[in-house]
Image (cartoon, grey):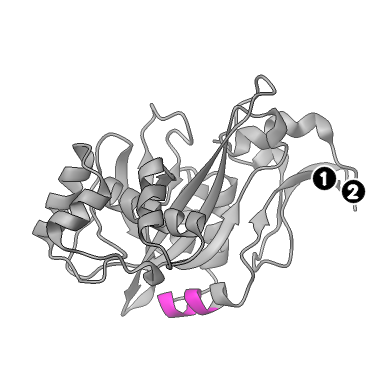
């Protein structure tokens, strides 16, 4: 193993949207949904969004829909007692809520929704109505098992960050008959492409992806369908991915563990895209 370079702590944090400042820490839990739609004539496509340039985290980057877990998510999780560990339940709820807010897609519902109902629910969320109230008014239940745990990422060196996210990633099948659209606030562009096509797009200068997104897309690009991605995800433990900086061959790399299913587990620091 190479020598760990502690002077690169700031660079590690920047790669994840962490900000160097006081020893005071705000570590927030977050959840992200990787929405997958199977294609008859090629590899499955994944929904990608371009973050608005005004956002504090990953401004202008291509990301999956998602965001921070809020107290209302935890309150709803507690009300759904018996569905699993509280924070895991809250994370899945947050992924469902954030996906609906940001893309208009209603994933994780026990009853398929038509486009008009999904639009109405999204509008209510954007007006500040809680997901719990929306579920009651529409007489709907959540189907949390529709979200397949895929990975969990948390930056190293968090003790020196002001803003750090501990993010759970879930796979979800794209709902039929619904169209995704930007919210024009947090995101300004969205599109469907295969994982490899998105990587190629960014390598050609058509977008940018930060380190965790690239590693996850590389892993997803190994498979052509939602079922294959889900089977792969189920075959590996969901452990926190806590990257570190290591000197390899005289060059500093940002590294991740090699036992979690990722085909590429390091990248030279001068190539790492930061949040």
Q: Position of residue 207 (x, y in %)?
A: 44, 43
Give the residue displayed 67% in from the left and 60% down from the top: 264
Give the residue displayed 9% in from the left and 57% down from the top: 116
Q: Residues within 10 Å of mark 2 (few under 14, many from 20)?
A: few
Assess whether residue 243 is covered by the magenta stretch. Answer: no
* Residue located farthest toward the left when viewing the structure as drawn: 116
Examine the rendering and report whether any part of residue 86 can be seen.
Answer: yes
Quadrant of the drawing holding the C terminus:
top right
Closest to the observer, 8 or 89: 89
> Is there CB contact under 8 Å for labels 2 and 1?
yes
Assess whether residue 229 is covered by the magenta stretch. Answer: yes
| 205 on left or right of 259 | left
The residue pinned by badge 1 equals: 246
The residue pinned by badge 2 equals: 2
Where disc 1 sits, the SS reads strand
Magenta span of residues: 226-231
Q: Main secondary structure of the magenta part?
A: helix
Give the residue displayed 56% in from the left and 34% down from the top: 17
| 115 on left or right of 16 | left
* Vertical placement of residue 65 versus 261, above or below: above
């Amino acid at each position: 193993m190479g020598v760990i370079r502690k002077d690169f702590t700031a660079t590690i944090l920047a790669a994840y949207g962490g900000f160097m400042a006081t020893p005071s820490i705000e570590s927030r839990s977050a959840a992200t949904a990787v929405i997958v739609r199977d294609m008859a004539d090629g590899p499955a496509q994944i929904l990608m969004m371009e973050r608005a340039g005004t956002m504090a985290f990953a401004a202008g980057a291509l990301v999956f829909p998602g965001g921070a877990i809020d107290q209302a998510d935890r309150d709803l999780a507690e009300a759904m007692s018996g569905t699993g560990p509280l924070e895991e339940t809250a994370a899945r709820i947050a992924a469902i809520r954030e996906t609906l807010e940001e893309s208009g897609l209603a994933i994780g519902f026990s009853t398929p929704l038509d486009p008009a109902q999904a639009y109405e629910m999204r509008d209510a969320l954007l007006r500040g109505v809680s997901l719990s109230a929306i579920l009651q008014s529409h007489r709907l239940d959540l189907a949390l098992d529709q979200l397949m745990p895929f990975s969990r990422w948390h930056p190293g060196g968090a003790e020196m960050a002001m803003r750090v996210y501990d993010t759970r990633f879930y796979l979800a099948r794209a709902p039929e008959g619904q169209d995704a659209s930007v919210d024009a606030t947090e995101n300004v562009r969205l599109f469907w492409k295969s994982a490899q096509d998105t990587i190629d797009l960014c390598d050609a200068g058509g977008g940018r992806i930060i380190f965790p997104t690239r590693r996850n897309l590389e892993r997803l690009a190994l498979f052509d369908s939602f079922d294959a991605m889900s089977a792969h995800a189920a075959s590996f433990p969901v452990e926190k991915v806590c990257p570190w900086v290591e000197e390899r061959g005289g060059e500093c790399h940002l590294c991740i563990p090699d036992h979690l299913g990722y085909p590429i587990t390091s990248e030279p620091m001068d190539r790492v895209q930061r949040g």
